[in-house]
Amino acid sequence: MSEVMQKMRAPLLPGVVALALSTAYLIALLAAEKQALIIGLLAFAVVAVLAAHYLGWLNLVSRSFADQEDVLGIYAILAACVVAAFFHDNHFVLLLFVTVLLYTVATLGLNIQFGYAGVLNFAGASFFGIGAYTSAVLSTYTAVPHLLVLLIGGMLAALIGSLLLVPVLRTRGHYAALVTIAFALLLKTFLEVNNVLGGPQGMQVKGMSILGWSFNDNFEIGKIEMSFYLNYFVVSMLLLTGTFVLVRRLERSWIGLNLDALRLDEIAASCFGLDIARWKITAFLLGNFLIGIAGALFGMVGGFVAPNNYTFADSLIMVSILLLGGIGNPWGLVVATFIVVVVPEKLQTIQEYRILLFALIVIMMLLFRPEGLLPRPVRRYFPGWRA
Amino acid sequence: MDVGLLAQYVMNGLMLGMMYTLVAVGFTLFFGVLDIIKFSHGDVLTVGAFTALATYIGLRSAGVSSTPLLLLAMLVVAILAMAALGMLIARYLVMPLRSAPALNTLLITLMLGTVLRELVRLFYPQGANPKPFPALLPTASINLGQFNLRLDNALMLAAGGLAIVGLQLLLNRTKLGLAIRAVAQDEETARTMGVNFTAVVLITFAIGSALAAYAGIMNGLYYNEINFGMGLYLGVIGFAAAIIGGLGSIYGAILGGFLFAALQTIGTVALPFASAYKDVFAFTVVIALIAWRPTGLIQEKISERV
């Protein structure tokens, strides 16, 4: 029986090749300094992906990922480590990379809300900011161990989010959108006018240190000097891996099935005895918890928090990442976060125009490929089953 | 508190409320015909204000110096241009997404708002800086104790009121208004009764966007300054006003607009904390209101279809 299943599985090779190629490409893109080269590389990527799509190769890759996810996941972690090792002494690239990892964690949290339960949250950046401010306050005024600070950041984001539960549960559609939008504006204004939290100038955040190991010092392995961001890379990678596994397990479990039912048709779901309020609360709080943890760590990485980093516009960028990747597909999120975070940073020539271009690209996506780059596949109820 | 000072605050609140109302009415109109939220509405307002300013500068350099003529030209150009822009947005961005999830429409219009905002910032000469807006209304004022009634404010308030009354008459007394209300009530039935659906939607978007241009000019005249980010703020407040009033109802938009302005004024004047907290206070009350009345104060009639 298991042999038959083994035979029905898609081969591993396309997935591995795709991972290897994208790792090599990512290294090339991150290492490139000349603007002409970067533009060339980006154009090449667009052409290559389109070509692979028309030749049917992308299909092979996605099947390979669907069937061999666990193995490929480990390869993906290896690939990330290779990229980090390649840039072991480059502060800027590592910071960028850590940013991508933490944004992915945050959008994974958002994904539970938008993608599975269908709960709208236009205040993603606000909850991210709550996490960051938590780590700023706790690391400045108290001696709480820093790993615990991350946890508290997440819990506080969930706790403050729970203040919104009544309006979130009672409203639908556009009315529900207002709740989180109003909250995003409220929180930003509050942070700006509040002197205790540093006002518009924000606050410094102390670097992380665990058991005496200070994260903000460069260190050496053998004779090779390592950037201190490598410390943060390790923690962020662990956080991302944990979150990814959690979200994936959640999606496949009966909880994920309940959340899907809830999103697709609330009334039908409640007719089948699902407790709508319970699952909405679960999704909203769990999502905010994950976003808060990511924010707390991000505060320590950046060493600085200010209200202007957590505006409504930033929340929109998070939602755009979700939509760009394909709502509900965690792998798509990883790809989309890379695109949204890395491309504008590398394309310094268009620095001034990047928000404009970014907005135009999202509009084009919505008009011509609204399901996102990597749409979520149909749920698989049996191993080897194909829709 | 002194009565005069109080009157001053009331007057300021009324001015703000009128601007919010003009924006909120747009949201409610669009929601009525298409059941969508068009989030670029606030940025259409910005573009309208900048179009008016550009018209002013253009005419001044062409030698026109008569103030009423300038004001009229600004109004006409900005209103027509924004009506056209609104129709284009409806035709090429909003209508193609009719069958898509509501989230997509929300996002595409949000992104369009970003595009408009960035276009103003990047391509209007020195668009990133605040621009002085000419004071074209008579600035004479009547002093009543501490209360200083400025003629231009009174004129603007009256003009805003006229626009709202005009819209109300248009919706309730004309054939076009009947068509708009028919589409808002039931699209399919309206179609079978011979209403040209696309035309009605486009005209509704033109009307809403024209009102935004009107509010943009009003905002410029009131503060004597415009900047590329003003629409985002006004748009969000207009949206909040339309929602707490109840989407799809003109009266709801009016109620919501003035209510929000009242909350801000109360937050500035009557509460024990610093006036900087006025928006925190206003938005907190908005969230509380929506929790109390999940479909707005003037409730939209919805029945669940299974």
Image (cartoon, helix red, strand yellow):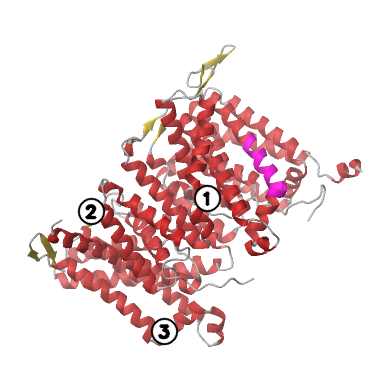
Q: Which chain carries label 1?
A: A
Find the distance from the CA under tag 1 to the CA under tag 3. Answer: 38 Å
Mark 2 neighbour density, 10 Å: few (under 14) some (14–19) many (20 or more): some
Mark drawn on residue B176: 3
What segment carries the magenta color? A242-255
Q: Quadrant of residue B71?
A: bottom left
Q: In this view, does B62 lie to the left or right of B163?
A: left
Q: Where's the C terminus of chain B, which quadrant?
A: bottom right
Residue A183 to residue A232: above or below: below
Residue A274 to residue B206: above or below: above
Mark drawn on residue B269: 2
Find the distance from the CA under tag 1 to the CA under tag 2. Answer: 37 Å
- Tell me, yes or no, whether the highlighted magenta stretch contains residue A253: yes
| x, y percent for residue A143 | 45, 23
Could one spot residue B63 in this view of the protein?
no
Check disc 2 and give the amino acid type: Val
Q: Where's the N terminus of chain B, which quadrant?
A: bottom left
- Tell me which secondary structure the magenta stretch mostly adopts: helix
Q: Which chain carries label 3?
A: B
| Residue mark closest to the camera, 3 vs 2 | 2
Q: Is residue B161 left or right of residue A313?
A: left
Q: Quadrant of residue B285?
A: bottom left
Q: Are marks 1 and 2 in contact (CB under 8 Å)?
A: no
What element does badge 1 sit on? helix
Q: Which residue is drawn at 48% across and 61% down?
A: A175
Mark drawn on residue A319: 1
| x, y percent for residue A104 | 57, 40
Q: Is residue A370 left or right of residue B26?
A: right
Find the distance from the CA under tag 3 to the CA under tag 2. Answer: 43 Å
Q: Which residue is drawn at 70% across and 42% down?
A: A249
Q: Is residue A330 left or right of residue A103?
A: right
